[in-house]
Amino acid sequence: MAKRDNGLNLQSSNLITRFFIGLFVAFMSVFILGPLFWLALQAFTTTWTFPNIKPDGWTLIWWRRVFETPSMVEAIRNSFITAVICLPAAYAAARYNYIGRRVFLIGMFAANSFPKLGLFASIATLFYALNLMGTMVGVIIIQLLGTIIYMTWIPAAAFAAVPKNLEEAARDAGASKFRVFRGITLRMAAPGIFVAMVMSFISAFDEAQGTYLVGAPSFFTMPTEMYALVLTYPVQIAAVFSILLAAPSVLLIGLARKQIIGGQLAEGFQIK
């Protein structure tokens, strides 16, 4: 009888636990997906007035207005240009040997250990002296502070995950060092390098605080343009721009999902 009561109590406890877990998951789903769903609807509505439960009408005019506004088109172009330039720049800074490389990398890592806004304000004083304020070069340097982390740590983890016995077996079979690197090491580390490029692109593409402080009022990207959109434009314009800003990140994360979740990349981060 006692065992039966214990079994019932345990079953009840499991049901209660599952209920609260399900409630929490539902709440988080609404909290995270709700605003995204609202933005997706706003991007195609004429107006949506309270207390109506559905939009007053549907239109594509807001999408056309975004691509007809020169400042918004320039911000979109600037975001892609700076993000793409940061990829080879960060990889070269992290992987190649040059004078002062160690000091440079330590400085980059240390820069990510402090509150960014105070750091950006300090960098701005230096940029004024070097005439880098309001320039693409200044914005790229700011964005490198974030991308250099991904381009160093993730590829290093990917290379560390390559089994040494495979490289040694290939060398014993007579393969040259370059052939071993190209055929085994680089091929197996490629998913990690791809993930590093994806994360670096997203970091540079979404960086806002430093870009706004250094680039404005002459150089704007999509994240910094959002400040003006939220304050001065209809909510539908901001919704369209938000979708355009989020789309590349979602697409790239989806492409790199398998490498991010597991495989050789995850093995490279294990502490042994």
Image: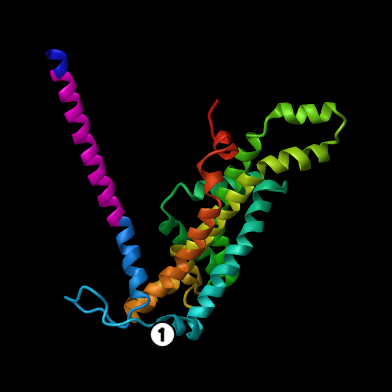
Residue at 75%, 31% (x, y): give it: 167
Secondary structure of residue under mark 1? helix
Is 68 left or right of 157, judged from the image as shown? left
Q: Position of residue 18 (x, y in %)?
A: 24, 37
Res 130 seen here:
no
Label 1, on which residue?
A: 61
Highlighted magenta segment, given as a residue range: 5-31
Residue at x 49%, y 74% (from the top left corner): 220
Residue nearest the observer in this picture, 40 or 141: 40
Residue at horizontal 57%, vertical 38%?
Answer: 263
In the picture, which quadrant includes the C terminus? top right
Question: Who is closer to the viewer here, 99 or 87?
Answer: 87
Residue 185 in magenta stretch = no
The quarter in which the N terminus is drawn is top left
**Residue 76 location in percent, x, y?**
52, 74
Q: Foreground residue, 57 or 190?
A: 57
